[in-house]
Image (cartoon, rainbow, N blue to C red):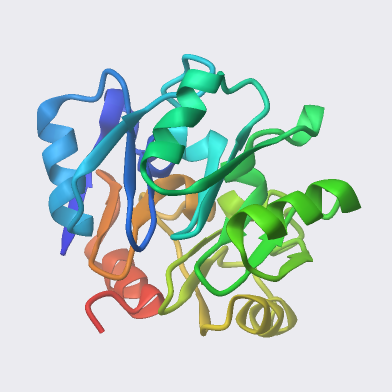
Amino acid sequence: MFKRLEPFGNPNVGVYARATSRHLFTPLGLTPENIRDIEDAVGLKAITASIGGSELVGSLVAANKFGAVVADFATDREMKVFKDAGLAVARLESSRLNAAGNNILVNDLGALVHPDLSAKAMKMVEQTLNVPVERAAIAGLPTVGTAGFATNKGVLVHPLSSETDLAFVKKALGVPARIGTVNHGHGLVGAGIAANQNGAAVGSKTTGIELGRIDEALGIGV
């Protein structure tokens, strides 16, 4: 299922919400209608979360069915939300790279991280998310969590991604990768999508052609 929406008046749904194969985290202040739309799209009940009091949950959280990596300014109370959901949780203590959702692209099979992430931080990501981790850039962009979006069926990546990029992403995340856009031509697809194997919530400006590419790339409903 697909839903188009504009949370907080912004079509970048993936900045605000984080969905995995088993969990959906949405921010404080989201309207009941927006929450219902995202729940309907991904087939999960929303869990309200915040990071450092911010509503940018999608940008500040990277998660899969095993764990969640959150920005280093998350409070203990905010981290407890993820622990109570049955996830391992850890802070990404890496100053300028602490926006975990922007700097980590992950599914239940593997993860890619910003090329400048330290070996110590990579080890923490690997242990928390319980998947192999590789450093990478996608289409020359180090913020892999915005340049791509992954489910356990496929990955959608920036339209300027090379064949080498696609092959590397496929190997690291264990599923096929395809190029596409969101919100009428925007290449930072990770910022515009909250999705899992059941469906996707996308920005309000996303076209029908883009929805077709997203459906194909992420293997929704397959």
Residue 185 percent location from the top left of the image: 43, 55
Task: Please tell me which residue is depicted at 44% across the width and 60% down the height of the picture.
Answer: 65
Q: Position of residue 90 (x, y in %)?
A: 63, 39
Name which residue lies at 40% across and 32% down. Answer: 81
Above or below residue 53? Residue 74 is below
In the image, 83 versus 6, the foreground residue is 83
User: In the image, 41: left or right of 157?
Assistant: left
Does residue 101 appear left or right of residue 132 in this picture? left
Residue 152 in which image quadrant: bottom left
**The one of 74 and 116 positioned closer to us in this rendering:** 74
Residue in the foreground of this view, choosing between 89 and 220: 89
Tell me what residue is drawn at x 87 percent, y 48 percent.
120
The image shows residue 141 at horizontal and vertical percentages of 73, 54
Q: Is residue 118 visible?
A: no
Looking at the image, can residue 7 be seen?
Answer: yes
**87 versus 129 height, above or below:** above
Residue 58 horizontal side relative to residue 19, left or right:
right
**Quadrant, the N terminus:** bottom left
Q: Going 44% across and 38% down the picture, which residue do you hit? A: 82
